[in-house]
Amino acid sequence: MNKKIHLDPYLFISISMLSFIGLFILFSASESSFGAISRQLIYIVLGFFLFFIFSQPDPDIYRRFSFLFLILSLFLVASTYFIGTEINGAKRWLKFYVFSFQPSELLKLALPLFLSSYLFHKKLPISFKDTLIAILFIFACFLIVARQPDLGTALLVTISGIFVLFLAGLSWLFIFLCLSAIAVFSPFIWNNLLQPFQKDRIWTLFNPESDPYGAGWNIIQSKIAVGSGGIFGKGYGQGSQTQLNFLPETQTDFIFSVLAEEFGFVGVLLLVMIYAFVLLRCFYLAVNARDRFCRLVIGGFIFTFCFNVFVNLAMVVGLIPVVGMPLPFFSRGGTSLLSLFIMFGIITSMASHKKFMQR
């Protein structure tokens, strides 16, 4: 008997479109660098291989080994403090010969998997004890990543855990109390926890023209690029902000600005429609998943994915401070791109295994 191949064609086609459109835009953003394209293409091919591998196991395997996966991920992140490679003042990478690996990306997968496994059989609403245990794990993951320092990834890891906690039945009263506590302690957070460059980014959000050649440069150039694209854009490879190097980080944080400048509103609309389709498809898969564990994993992953997309798009148009968060499947990257393929491979596994009756 032939073993069934588990694959969701709609998700597969969607992420394929995102990956190869992103590769197309990256070629322009990198000033036609075949080296950058070759590296990204290698990661995409490897990513599809991982997507296939992680989509085949039964979800029970992920549930049973979720805690070990979380411990391994925390260990790898902690090891960067001692043997990590320092780049731009941060120790976020482990280097194995010519391959660099950012272990904090694994926490975006390991934490939601573990919390889904821990909470999926709890009564609703989940108890204060279970809520507190989940928050302790979330805080530990945030702390260990933020100390690298990597506030963007730490924020995304935290959000990935909070989404699962919310979907598992977090009390609205508890949510209100937490938001109230954040509001009360915000002066302490501002004065004691934020670094000077992070404060500068927040101030710059409200008035980027106050330092147009310093802290405000990135967002000003990004807004110029996005706004100058108009309806149909300036044409592929014809963006002045991109090609004349006014726009910073064109291959990573601000690659959306390249798309907007060269393909205008039409290109932006196409990209948003693909992301929206991925979101709706995953919602459908979550609703029809075989049990609560699978629904929590799919829901937690897709909410985290959408938050990542929203933060990047809001960042490049000046709605929120610049936090250094790449655009999924578009921005140049290795570990972050591979983690996305693994994430959607796990989503496919959760959605396509139907051998048990729904609970």
Image: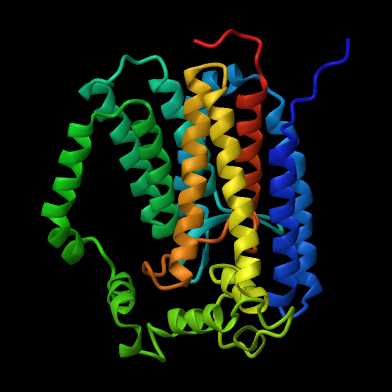
> With respect to residue 321, does 337 lie above or below?
above
On-image quarter of the N terminus: top right
- Looking at the rendered structure, the number of numbered marks drawn on it comes to 0
Q: Is residue 107 visible?
A: no
Question: Residue 210: percent from the left, percent from the top?
Answer: 30, 89
Looking at the rendering, which quadrant does residue 127 occupy? top left
Task: Give the colour scheme shown.
Answer: rainbow
Q: Is residue 196 left or right of residue 269?
A: left
Q: Residue furthest left?
A: 184
Specify whether 211 is left or right of 236. left
In which quarter of the view is residue 216 placed?
A: bottom left
Relative to the observer, which residue lies in front, 301 or 42?
301
What residue occupies the far right of the structure in this picture?
A: 1
Q: Residue at x 42, y 58 (%)?
A: 152
Answer yes or no: is residue 308 visible: yes
The image shows residue 298 at horizontal and vertical percentages of 53, 32
List the single residue furthest toward the front.
Answer: 231
Q: Is residue 322 rendered to the left or right of residue 61?
A: left
Can you give x and y, in whole percent of width and height, for residue 36 in the image? 74, 69
Q: Is residue 1 above or below residue 99?
A: above
Residue drawn at 44 percent across, 65 percent down: 314
In the image, 281 versus 36, the foreground residue is: 281
Q: Residue drawn at (65%, 27%), measured in percent from left and top? A: 349
Position of residue 231 relative to residue 75, above or below, is: below
Spot occupied by residue 53 in the image (x, y as percentages of width and height)? 73, 32
